[in-house]
Image (tube, rainbow, N blue to C red):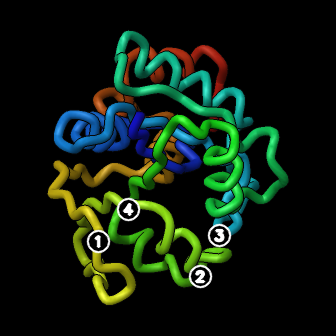
Amino acid sequence: MKIGLYFGSFNPIHIGHLIIANHVANNTNLQKVWFVVSPQNPLKQSSSLLNEYDRLHLINISIEGENKLRPSNVEFSLPKPSYTVDTLAYLTEKFTEHEFSIIMGSDSFSNITKWKNYEVILKNYALYIYKRPGFDIDISLKTDLILLDAPLLEISSTRIRELIKNNKSIKYLVPDLVKEEIERNGYYK
């Protein structure tokens, strides 16, 4: 099975993440898209991160009933911080029947040379890259990139957390069930 891995903190998951994942699932040859929750991204501060199990739960409730989308906690049991190359090696070894690819924005791709063993990723895995404004895609790094024109919304998890801290509404930015769960548990206050 062809599986696209959509890595992220998803702190919290929002409509923008879901639109991209759904677009990729419906408009590429990938059969499934896994949301890989990163407990600790080596390029980001971890102080504002909600517990990874809570973030996974928010993804679960946001994609319930979607058969092409699923959450993944694979990085929870791997050494922290999480490095994509290590996660890919683990998944490739554990699930030999699957073919894994990476889904990322052109903003992330512009930093790929800073990733641990990025050459291994470029050599061995297909990359599905959706364009983000202001971030050109350097195709000299890898010639067989799959470029996508996914619908983009200017929504960020950082902005959502700021709204919550300031007691502002996040309605329409996250699925209703996610909004209710965040409010019920006092997340990001």
N-terminal of the pair, mark 4 or mark 3, is: 3
Between the C-alphas of marks 1 and 3, the distance is 26 Å
Q: Which residue is mark 1?
A: 144
Disc 1 residue type (three-letter): Asp
User: SS class of the residue under badge 2?
Assistant: helix
Estimate how packed mark 2 is, as few (under 14), some (14 to 19) or many (20 or more) residues with alpha carbons within 10 Å: few
Name which residue lies at 29% across and 69% down: 145
Q: Which residue is mark 4?
A: 127
Disc 2 residue type (three-letter): Lys
User: SS class of the residue under badge 4?
Assistant: strand
Q: Which residue is mark 3?
A: 43
N-terminal of the pair, mark 1 or mark 2, is: 2
User: SS class of the residue under badge 1?
Assistant: loop
Q: Which circle, 4 or 3, is nearer the viewer?
A: 4
Contact check, label 3 and label 2, Cβ < 8 Å: yes
Where 188 falls versus 182 (above or below)?
below
Please tell me which residue lies in front, 138 or 96: 96
Quadrant in which the C terminus is drawn: top right
Give the label on residue 114, or none: 2
N-terminal of the pair, mark 1 or mark 4, is: 4
User: SS class of the residue under badge 3?
Assistant: loop
Contact check, label 1 and label 4, Cβ < 8 Å: no
